[in-house]
Image (cartoon, rainbow, N blue to C red):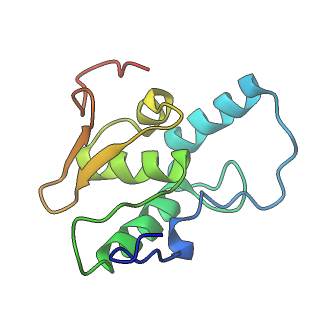
């Protein structure tokens, strides 16, 4: 399909580890996600903390040898990684993500941009 661009799967880009979590209402899930970012070193929603998932994503991105690349992942781990990279509130980043969304991340310069609007935002992040 993309002969010059091989597709590789890296398990370190999976979503924040849930383990066994019951089905939650959208409101309860959002409250739990907020708690994950309020207590980033504590596993709140499953078996992995936001901090641990961000470190895992950082390792995966650090292994990339050819840039630029496209990385596809999930909302909570992306938010944890981005918030640590540029110093934004992780929950605010998570709430600002659209489905789907594209962020341009330069880990060396510690910059994050959205393809169609400015990022990072000052203050409240727009949805």
Residue 19 lies left or right of residue 84; in this view the side is right
State the image coordinates of residue 41 (x, y, percent, origin top left): 52, 56
Q: Is residue 61 above or below residue 76?
A: below
Q: Is residue 39 visible?
A: no
For the C terminus, the image quarter is: top left
Left or right: 27 as drawn, with respect to 85:
right
The structure residue drawn at horizontal position 72% and vertical position 33%, both measured from the top left corner, is 29
- Count of numbered circles on the image: 0
Does the rendering let one see residue 93?
yes
When the figure is inspected, residue 90 is found, relative to residue 65, above or below; the finding is above
Q: Kindly give the residue lying farthest to the left in the view shown.
A: 109
Q: Nearer the viewer, residue 50 or 94?
A: 94
Residue at (63%, 61%) from the top-left corner? 48
Identify which residue is drawn at 74% across, 26% down: 26
Task: Name the spot of residue 50 as percent of width and height, x first.
Answer: 52, 53
Where is residue 126 drawn, in percent x and y? 37, 18
Q: Is residue 78 left or right of residue 110?
A: right
Q: Is residue 58 above or below residue 98?
A: below
Q: Residue at x 30, y 65 (%)?
A: 69
Q: Quadrant of residue 81?
A: bottom left
Front one among 111 and 9: 9
In the picture shown, does residue 61 fall above or below 31?
Answer: below
The image position of residue 66, as x and y in percent, is: 23, 77
Question: Which quadrant of the structure image shows residue 118?
Answer: top left
């Amino acid at each position: 399909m993309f002969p010059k661009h091989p597709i590789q799967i890296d398990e370190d880009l999976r979503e924040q580890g849930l383990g066994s979590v019951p089905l939650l209402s959208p409101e309860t899930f959002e409250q739990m996600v907020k708690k994950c970012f309020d207590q980033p070193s504590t596993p709140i929603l499953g078996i992995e903390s936001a901090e641990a998932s961000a470190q895992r994503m950082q390792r995966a991105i650090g292994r990339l040898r050819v840039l630029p690349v496209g990385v596809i992942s999930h909302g909570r781990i992306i938010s944890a990684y981005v918030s640590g990279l540029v110093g934004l509130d992780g929950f605010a980043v998570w709430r600002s993500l659209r489905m789907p969304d594209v962020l341009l991340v330069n880990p060396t310069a510690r910059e994050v941009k959205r393809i169609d609007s400015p990022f990072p935002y000052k203050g409240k992040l727009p949805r």
